[in-house]
Amino acid sequence: MKKYLLLLLLFISFTSFSQTQDVDFPVNVKPDEKVQTVSIIQLISNPEKYDGKIISVAGFLNLGFEETALYLSQNDEEHKLKKNSIWIDKDSDRSSIYHKEYVIITGTFDMKNNGHFGSFSGTLKKITNIYKQ
């Protein structure tokens, strides 16, 4: 009996730690559209390869006035290395729970829109999903 109770306890604790909190956005990915998982480094070095494509990318999210961006790292955000980030065109306040967090975001990459004053290395728009990494 103790063995089953221990297994149940381990299962419950494992599932509670492995859950992430998703935020739903109004734009949905169509079933025939493939989402490419890329790094910020790939986006910065080869923006034309991902322009107009639906991508999923991880990074450190900062949500602030005139600097809503996904940075390569927290250190890059702290030092405002904007070329090491992509502008996030957010149209929902629901994402504010992820301010100053490492996240994975899915949306459409736009290499021509470089955010506020053209300081960033592209824009992620039409956000479909965001969750903690």
Image: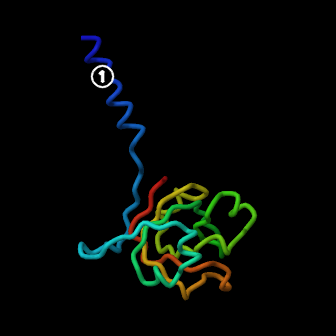
Q: Label 1 is placed on what type of residue? A: Leu
Q: Position of residue 57 (x, y in %)?
A: 48, 65
Q: Which residue is farthest right?
A: 79
Quadrant in the picture for residue 129: bottom left
Judge from the rendering whether residue 100 lies leftward or rightward of residue 8; answer left or right.
right
Residue ID for mark 1: 7
The N terminus - image quarter: top left
Quadrant in the picture for residue 86: bottom right
Mark 1 closeness class: few <14, some 14–19, many ≥20 residues within 10 Å: few
- Nearest the viewer among 130 and 73 is 73
Q: Position of residue 41 (x, y in %)?
A: 58, 69
Label 1 SS: helix
Judge from the rendering whether residue 33 lies leftward or rightward of residue 92; answer left or right.
left
- Nearest the viewer among 37 and 107 is 37
Q: State the residue at coordinates (54%, 74%).
A: 43
- Nearest the viewer among 100 and 53 is 53
Q: State the residue at coordinates (65%, 70%).
A: 84
- Vertical position of residue 93 compared to residue 123: above or below: above
Q: State the residue at coordinates (41%, 51%).
A: 21
Q: State the residue at coordinates (45%, 57%).
A: 131
Q: Position of residue 56 (x, y in %)?
A: 43, 67
Q: Position of residue 122 (x, y in %)?
A: 56, 80
Query: How many marks overall?
Result: 1
Q: Which residue is farthest top?
A: 1
The colour mode here is: rainbow
- Vertical position of residue 42 compared to residue 20: above or below: below
Judge from the rendering whether residue 6 lies leftward or rightward of residue 91; answer left or right.
left
